[in-house]
Image (cartoon, rainbow, N blue to C red):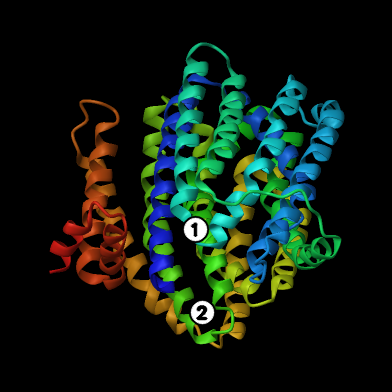
């Protein structure tokens, strides 16, 4: 199989996995749990994840990225080193979480009951450590089919368990036990899909080499974590768990492109770029193909959320989540900028410039740190959302300038690749909005559903005829998924 075919098949499987898992998550959390649970429940779990993820960097230390970057680990020593270090670090960090949980509960306003939630949810770090190296090796070898199946099953278990427990009155614990079940299933099933088995050996020299590479990765990730989570921390601290619940809800709805499809692209393209890091022209071509593919999904999703989302939130939740609407609209801009810029980080890392990520993250963290408190005083969670959107757009401009230096490319390819997508998306969403204004409303959600169907149809038809990349990618995905190859052949005829 050629390298291009490997990447295409990987993209198809990761895309399929991401869509399935995120659809399940959307149904479970956004459509069901958000109607059953209270905003404070989501805020409490949001605070717990904030604390866990803040300490999780000390467990990972860039080891997984270093394992992917190393192309000379034929004897598997680096994989064994990663396996042992991740588990040991996971146990140690969980001990820290267990001890400091009461202090974290005292720090946040209205976070009553956080300590047992945090101590229980923190077990996910140890559970994930057991399977993380296997997942990393599957990604390194572009075996995303074997990586996707456990993730889909785990997502299904998580969604079903959380819904059942919520309907039975478990409250916030429905979310907690759902996440725990996800980790257990994911880390168990991966061993049935990975041929690698660890050996109990540890090489300090290899560990130091991996840390040397990983320190730049972890440095930038700590900065990025600070940027993407300092808002949660201060909202929870200054406004309380309920306000954080509204903000988390707004973020979840508005950042589908950034949080879901960006992870999809990152999981494929960093290993892929690492394998061709010496072929600069090839990297440049694949990068622009990738950002165009991301835009084909993220741009229409973002514009649809911006324009159609308020109607859905108000009518479906009957006003329960209305305080999140304006924040969500601003965060759409933030999420779109993040999704388009995400693959630039893969280029920096694969071409040996991970420190550039640290530089970018530093200015973002300083800017957010200085302006965030005034933004909260100004307009609460809406002020935070406006600040996040502005910083993300400026960051995209700077990241593009740096990337152009690295790849010796100009700005014209961005306009040529992305301009038609924005135009087609704007026409599609605008048409859907007009339909929503005049559609009959025997039920409060009928106009939204009709508008959504119209938008998808118009976007698909216009993209098929006027955006060759859409047609090429659609046919490629159908071919790679096996059962739909016959359909792909008929469409391409």
Question: Quadrant location of the N terminus?
Answer: bottom left
Q: Residue at x 42, y 29 (%)?
A: 31
Say which residue appears at 56% left-offset and 66% top-offset. Answer: 271
Q: Residues within 10 Å of mark 1 (few under 14, many from 20)?
A: many
Residue 349 position in % (x across, y down): 65, 70
| Figure check: 131 above or below 184 | below
Pinpoint residue 382: horizontal percent, then vertical percent: 60, 44
Q: Nearer the viewer, mark 1 or mark 2?
A: 2
At x 50%, y 49%, the residue is 147
Q: Position of residue 244 (x, y in %)?
A: 64, 34
Quick one: 479 or 308, which is closer to the camera? 479
Q: Which residue is mark 2?
A: 283
* Left or right relative to 57: residue 316: left
Residue 363 drawn at (x, y percent): 74, 65
Q: 181 or 387, which lies in front? A: 181
Residue in the image at 75% along x and 59% along y? 218
Residue 481 visible somewhere in the drawing: yes
Residue annotated with mark 1: 336
Left or right position of 227 against 150: right
Drawn side of residue 325 relative to residue 87, left or right: left
Residue closest to the eye, 77 or 366: 77
Instruction: Quarter of the image for the C terminus: give it.
Output: bottom left
Left or right, 44 with respect to 210, comes to: left
Instruction: Choose top left, top right, bottom left or bottom right for residue 438.
Output: top left
Q: CA distance from mark 1 to mark 2?
A: 23 Å
> Can I make out residue 235 in this image?
no
How many other residues sit within 10 Å of disc 2, few (<14), some (14-19) or many (≥20)? many
Q: Kindly state the secondary structure of the residue where label 2 is placed.
A: helix
Find residue 423 and report its image quarter. bottom left
Task: Give the SS element for disc 1.
Answer: helix
């Amino acid at each position: 199989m050629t390298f291009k075919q490997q990447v295409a098949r990987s993209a198809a499987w990761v895309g399929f996995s991401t869509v399935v898992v995120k659809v399940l998550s959307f149904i479970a959390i956004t459509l069901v749990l958000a109607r059953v649970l209270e905003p404070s429940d989501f805020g409490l779990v949001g605070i717990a994840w904030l604390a866990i993820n803040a300490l999780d960097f000390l467990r990972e230390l860039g080891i997984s990225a270093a394992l992917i970057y190393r192309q000379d680990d034929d004897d598997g020593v680096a994989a064994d080193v990663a396996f042992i270090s991740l588990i040991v670090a996971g146990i140690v960090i969980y001990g820290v979480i267990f001890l400091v949980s009461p202090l974290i509960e005292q720090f946040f306003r209205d976070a009553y009951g956080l300590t047992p939630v945090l101590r229980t949810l923190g077990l996910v770090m140890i559970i994930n450590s057991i399977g993380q190296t296997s997942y990393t090796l599957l990604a390194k070898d572009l075996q995303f089919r074997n990586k996707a199946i456990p993730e889909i099953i785990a997502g299904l278990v998580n969604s079903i368990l959380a819904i059942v427990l919520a309907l039975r009155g478990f409250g916030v614990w429905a979310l907690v036990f759902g996440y725990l079940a996800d980790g257990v299933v994911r880390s168990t099933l991966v061993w049935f899909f990975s041929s690698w088995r660890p050996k109990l050996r540890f090489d300090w020299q290899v560990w130091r080499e991996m840390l040397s590479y990983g320190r730049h990765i972890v440095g930038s990730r700590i900065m990025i974590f600070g940027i993407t989570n300092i808002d949660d921390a201060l909202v929870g601290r200054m406004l309380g768990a309920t306000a954080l619940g509204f903000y988390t809800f707004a973020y979840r709805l508005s950042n589908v492109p950034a949080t879901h499809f960006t992870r999809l692209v990152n999981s494929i393209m960093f290993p892929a770029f690492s394998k061709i890091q010496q072929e600069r022209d090839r990297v440049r071509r694949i990068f622009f193909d990738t950002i165009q593919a991301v835009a084909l999904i993220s741009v229409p999703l973002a514009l649809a959320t911006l324009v159609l989302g308020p109607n859905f939130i108000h009518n479906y939740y009957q006003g329960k989540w209305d305080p999140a609407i304006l924040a969500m609209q601003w965060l759409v801009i933030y999420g779109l900028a993040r999704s388009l810029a995400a693959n630039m980080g893969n280029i920096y890392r694969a071409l040996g410039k991970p420190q550039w990520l640290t530089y970018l993250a530093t200015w973002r963290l300083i800017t957010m740190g200085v302006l965030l408190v005034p933004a909260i005083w100004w307009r609460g969670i809406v002020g935070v959302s406006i600040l996040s959107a502005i910083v993300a757009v400026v960051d995209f401009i700077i990241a593009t300038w740096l990337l152009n230096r690295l790849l010796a490319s100009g700005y014209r390819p961005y306009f040529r690749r992305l301009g038609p997508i924005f135009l087609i998306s704007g026409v599609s969403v605008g048409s859907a909005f007009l339909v929503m204004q005049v559609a009959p409303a025997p039920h409060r959600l009928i106009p939204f559903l009709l508008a959504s169907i119209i938008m998808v149809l118009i976007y698909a038809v216009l993209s098929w005829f006027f955006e060759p990349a859409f047609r090429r990618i659609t046919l490629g995905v159908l071919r790679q998924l096996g059962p739909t190859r016959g359909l792909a052949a008929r469409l391409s005829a």
